[in-house]
Image (cartoon, grey):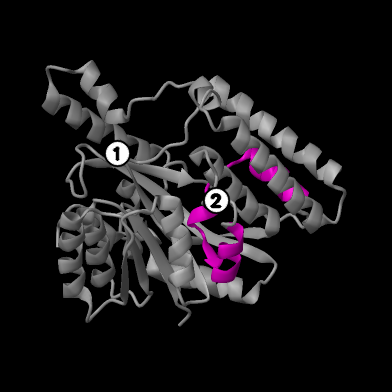
Amino acid sequence: MVKVSILIPTMNRPEFVVRLLEYYNLVKSKHPIYIGDASNSINKNKLLKKINTYKSVLDVNYFHWPNFNDLKTLDELVKQSKEDYCAYIGDDDFLIPNSLEICANFLEKNLDYRTAQGKAMIFHFKEAGPYGKTFFSGEYWKNNSIENDKSSERFLEFGKNYWTPVFSVKRRKEFLKDLEFYGNMPDKNFGELISNFTFISRGKSKFLDCLYLIRQGHNERYLMKSGTNWIKSPNWNKSLQICIKSLSSIISKEDQIGYKKANYIVNKVFDDIIVRSIKKGDKISENFFDKAKNLFKNHVLFSDLLISIYRNLQAFLFPKKFEMSHLRILKKNSKYYKDFKPIYKVITNKF
């Protein structure tokens, strides 16, 4: 078995980490877990108490780094991990153990690929917190292979169809190298952008047909800033220049082309990103539950029923489009049923 380090930065959310441990215990995962915790002493002790109950069945490595931000924590977790392959996950999300091994096995045999990942779903509870009975779900990312031979071609394709290979399986040494600029980036948006573009610039990325990642959407989840508020932020221009210079150097080296030509490609892609961000603006769309409640403010039970009917109808009428809905995956004839059912048990507390 090829083991993959599961890297989990967290801060003052022990209940989410406990939920993850409950899941990995339920599926008897053999992949080592590395937790970097920036919590206060109360939440640190809550988490440690629970970790100790799983020490005999899970390989859990815990580190308390109260002065680290999430970027520094991830960097340190990669350094602390011992396995050849690793994958990063938010404390409120799930990586499927079987799929981690599938992706690592692929990378083992295909050295020109830098990242590998499978299908991904995102779900939203009606209420905040790690557990709930009512939620809706959908596709988090598309089938996302990028297999062009040239770094510049992959960069241009990725610029048109951006996603987050930071969550993919990677070789530990390569991941550490690709995080070179991530932790020290003044602007967090550019920190995400430079790391994801770096992964793609330095190697191919393979999509494999397996259920790989389950993300939870909620109000506390970090979302990239957009619009004028991002552009007006104090570290915006400095971070942009670091991004362009660093990525231009990578492409120039990988494709063995002049820096000026590589710089033109990077500027073209980032011009498009900035224009799209301005167009998107700062409007935050309501989730489907909020929209329904606004339409039927005095009929709460009716709006919940309407949502349920609507989602079931979508999944029935458009099976391809809504393949990543839990309403389809929970059917026993789904190829992803066995991998999703334990997560469903954990998040709904239906052990």
Q: In this rendering, does residue 208 appear at all?
A: no
Asked whether the beta carbons under mark 1 and mark 2 sit within 8 Å of each other, the answer is no
Q: Nearer the viewer, residue 201 or 336?
A: 201
Q: Nearer the viewer, residue 251 or 29?
A: 251
Q: Is residue 170 magenta-colored?
A: yes
The local secondary structure at tag 2 comes to loop
Residue drawn at (45%, 52%) of the image:
71
Against 136, is 199 above or below?
Answer: below
Where is mark 2, residue-wise? Answer: 182
The local secondary structure at tag 1 comes to helix
Against 205, is 53 above or below?
Answer: below
Mark 1 or 2: in front is: 2
Q: Main secondary structure of the magenta part?
A: helix
Q: Amino acid at mark 1?
A: Asn
- Using residue 181 as the reference point, say whether residue 334 is left or right of it: left
Where is mark 1, residue-wise? Answer: 312
Counting other residues with Cα less than 10 Å from the Cα at mark 1, is it few (<14), some (14-19), or many (20 or more)? some
Residue drawn at (48%, 66%) of the image:
78
- Using residue 259 as the reference point, say whether residue 299 is left or right of it: left
Magenta residues (range): 152-178
Q: Is residue 15 magenta-colored?
A: no
